[in-house]
Amino acid sequence: MRIALILAPLVALVALVAVFAMSIDRDPGLVRSVLIDKPAPQFDLAPVEGLDVPGFSRESLMGEPTLVNVFASWCVPCRAEHPLLEAMKAETGIRLFGINHNDPPENARAFLAELGNPYDAVGADRDRRVSIDWGVYGVPETFLVNAEGVIVYKHVGPMTPGSIEREVLPAIAAMRGE
């Protein structure tokens, strides 16, 4: 009887760990967002001051598939991901919009001047309000929005060559009907 009382909490703990382990999403970069299959939130972002690309709004997302990347100059993983975004844009020709998250304009300009600017539009989200509306946990995060302005995919954290090959490129092809 004593052994059963001692082992009961241990058995319960093991059972809880097993349940939690089975419920964890296998791919930590793919986060099931409540916005998936829903229209992108209503927003209107001004351009980053001094950058040669416009800002954008929800209406700007309409008409063709768009990859929306949330980034910041102070984000080390954003720096690592940046060459992959440039390569993906060159390979697929997808429209690429950036949400510059909580960044002074001079820092955003320096970041893109140093690494290159693959973005067709970059909106300045200085107060993080738009990022919150998109359900952003942190940077970088990337969304695919179809031609109707509906979010069809979300990736949290820096994309990798593997995640691009397995997830992003097939999602782009599906949006294009390929």
Image (cartoon, grey):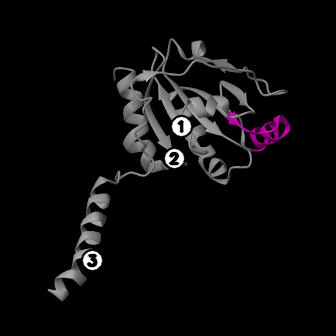
Q: CA distance from mark 1 to mark 3?
A: 41 Å
Residue 10 got which mark? 3
Q: Amino acid at mark 3?
A: Leu
Q: Which numbered mark, 3 or 2, is in the foreground of this view? A: 3
* Residue drawn at (18%, 87%) of the image: 3
Pick whichever, 168 or 20, lies toward us.
20
Q: CA distance from mark 3 to mark 2?
A: 39 Å
Lower position in the chain sequence, tag 3 or tag 2: 3
Direction front: furthest residue:
1
Query: Which residue is tagged 2?
Result: 159
On-image quarter of the N terminus: bottom left
Pick whichever, 167 or 71, lies toward us.
71
Secondary element under disc 3, as helix, strand or loop, is helix
Residue 120 horizontal/vertical position (percent): 65, 24
Q: Look at the numbered discs 1 and 3 and tell me whether their residues touch, using CB distance below 8 Å.
A: no
Lower position in the chain sequence, tag 1 or tag 2: 1
